[in-house]
Image: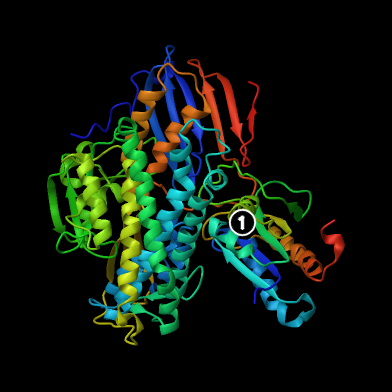
Amino acid sequence: MNHSFDLETAQNPSSLRRTVIEPVSRVEGHGKVTILLDDQNKVHQVRLHIVEFRGFEKFIEGRPYWEVPVLVQRLCGICPVSHHLASSKAMDMIVGATQLTPTAEKIRRLMHYGQMLQSHALHFFHLSSPDLLFGFDADVAKRNVIGVAAANPEVAKKGVLLRKYGQEVIRVTSGKRVHGTGSIPGGVNKSLSTEERDYLLKDIDQMIAWSRDAVRIIKQLHCQNPALYDSFAMVPSTMMSLVGTSGEMDFYHGALRARDKDGEVMFDQVSYQGYNSLLTEGVKPWSYMKFPYITALGEEAGWYRVGPLSRVQNCDVIPTPLAEAERQEFLAHAQGGPMHGSLAFHWARMVEMLFSAETIKSLLLDDDLLGDQLVTSGPRRQEGIGVIEAPRGTLFHHYRVNDDDVVTYANLIVSTTNNNMAMNIAVRDVAKNYLNGRELTEGLLNHIEVAIRCFDPCLSCATHALGRMPLDVSLVDAGGRQIDRLIKDDRGEIVQVAS
Amino acid sequence: MIAPTLIFGWGNPSRGDDALGPMLIERIEALLPAHPQWGEVDLLTDFQLQVEHALDLAGRRRVLFVDACAAALDGPYRVSRLRPARDASFTTHSLSPEGVMMVFAEMTGAEPPPCHLLAIAGHGFELGNPLGDLAGANLEAALSWTGRWLTGDKSTTE
């Protein structure tokens, strides 16, 4: 059984001291960690509160269905392409496009793998590698991409250029640098010209080489300190993802598979059209974000983890040679059992980045990308469900459309919501192991943030306007009195607020 | 040929006043044909600043970053000269403009071009909301300043 409820609710919370970390740094949106300590600094309760924006569905309902693939990109500044494509797949069903033309499907795949490449590059080189390269307790000024650039200019440069290349794939396939309109219900609105294909082909071998370098970096870090990397923020859990019809890794399309924490297949090739009976979106009174679980297993045992660490261990094979070789090394390191330490996310993520780069190359060598059969359609339907493996995990879009072509119902389960319970477990594991009886320091707080960042959570696109207060830490005694408060401003300056 | 002037406005067009950056870009784009004296100008937008935007600074003579500002300002907008900074901010998935400049400096070994930040006061940032009336007035004031900046009016950056 997954140990989901340990430390979720203390027996006597009113007598405990409260530590609040708000919001979690380098995580999109708002996140707040609440830790209740007793007088001996023993952890009694840990909860990750994510202030999820609740207006997604209302934002979409009432709009014409053909606007939705463009509109949903504005839900999230981090993975707009994932929403663009998941909603397109759902709208394919509305227009009766059960089978896209080869050109349309491959253009979409190219766009999606470009998104995966740039997202994974950003996360590893920008958000997480600073922690990994400098250590969790390093000077905060070093723990960001600029610190990496100063100490390792070549590593930082590769990260920037990998990211830029992925963005170029998106621009070429979607027609615009941001808010592209490339994917439409039933297909795409443009294919590639020979010049565009050659432009992207020119640099792809370099991108593959740099992706291999990135796998080597994280593999080396992992193998140099297995005691930390194999056990930090341990989350033994069910793993769920899409896989292809032969069990292969596929980010664009497939059916659902889940393995239990020991690696045994629980279900396989389950159509995502039945997601709303397979899964239940649980709610907890202390959190705005839902807690999805596999209905048949119930709330306590049925939660699961999605994203790179699940995908790499859930599939039977990666259909590109270099990434598959790296997956085999990953599995060998695990010595036959699944890896559940959260830092293994980074290794898995870089294997996926290599897979993405290899897939982009194979797609670019396919002349179907140059075709002119872009759109198809069939009998009109009133309901559509589209699912995709987004950079952070499985993403569900579900719509109903009336006879006037207006969306009357929308339901989205985003990747970060799928990982809600797993992230809570990761934070509890870190709090238990690193905060008991220890002084609250920035380095210790960063351990919690490191654990959360492993999941690369995308917390629903908070506005980023200048002036936002990014970090607020409060310490409250058993009587409810605030005894200390630290504020970190958006420049990293720490201000102590007198009680 | 890289345009010597870059204006980069960022924000989510569907989040109320967060649209100020992209909307200023739209307005300038419409004005460009009637103002040849502004010279060649590149206009870019995105949801937020990221590491790859450092590459957009290359070859520029001057750069203006434009964003909505949630903090209280003395007026409708605030202009500040930017310097590259080892940005220790916890800025989620987005970089500060100073951080973008520093990435440029670290990657190229060269000084970034002169950069200014035009921060326009915004007040509401809810998904699905249009630009507020107050923010709209602030946008007009910021647009006027930008026109003077584009003509090379030295008072705009002193």
- Tell me, yes or no, if residue A391 can be seen here: no
Which residue is rendered at x = 48% and y = 25% of the image?
A19
> Disc 1 designates what residue?
B104
Q: Is residue A33 left or right of residue A107?
A: right
- Front-most of B90 and A36? B90
Q: Secondary structure at mark 1?
A: helix
Which residue is rendered at x = 48% and y = 51% of the image?
A155
Q: Is residue A469 above or below residue A176?
A: above
Which percent across, then down, holds residue A299? 23, 39
Q: Quadrant of the N terminus of chain B?
A: bottom right
> Which quadrant would residue A468 be assigned to in this image?
top right
- Tell me, yes or no, if residue B91 can be seen here: yes
How packed mark 1 is, by other alpha carbons closer than 10 Å (few <14, some 14-19, many 20 or more), is many
Which percent across, then down, holds residue A329? 23, 47
Q: Is residue A326 left or right of residue B141?
A: left
> Which quadrant would residue A238 be assigned to in this image?
top left
Q: Single out the residue that lies furthest toward the top.
A: A40
Which residue is rendered at x = 67% and y = 50% of the image?
B84
Q: Quadrant of the C terminus of chain B?
A: bottom right
Q: Single out the residue that lies furthest toward the right.
A: B155
Q: Is residue A248 above or below residue A185?
A: above
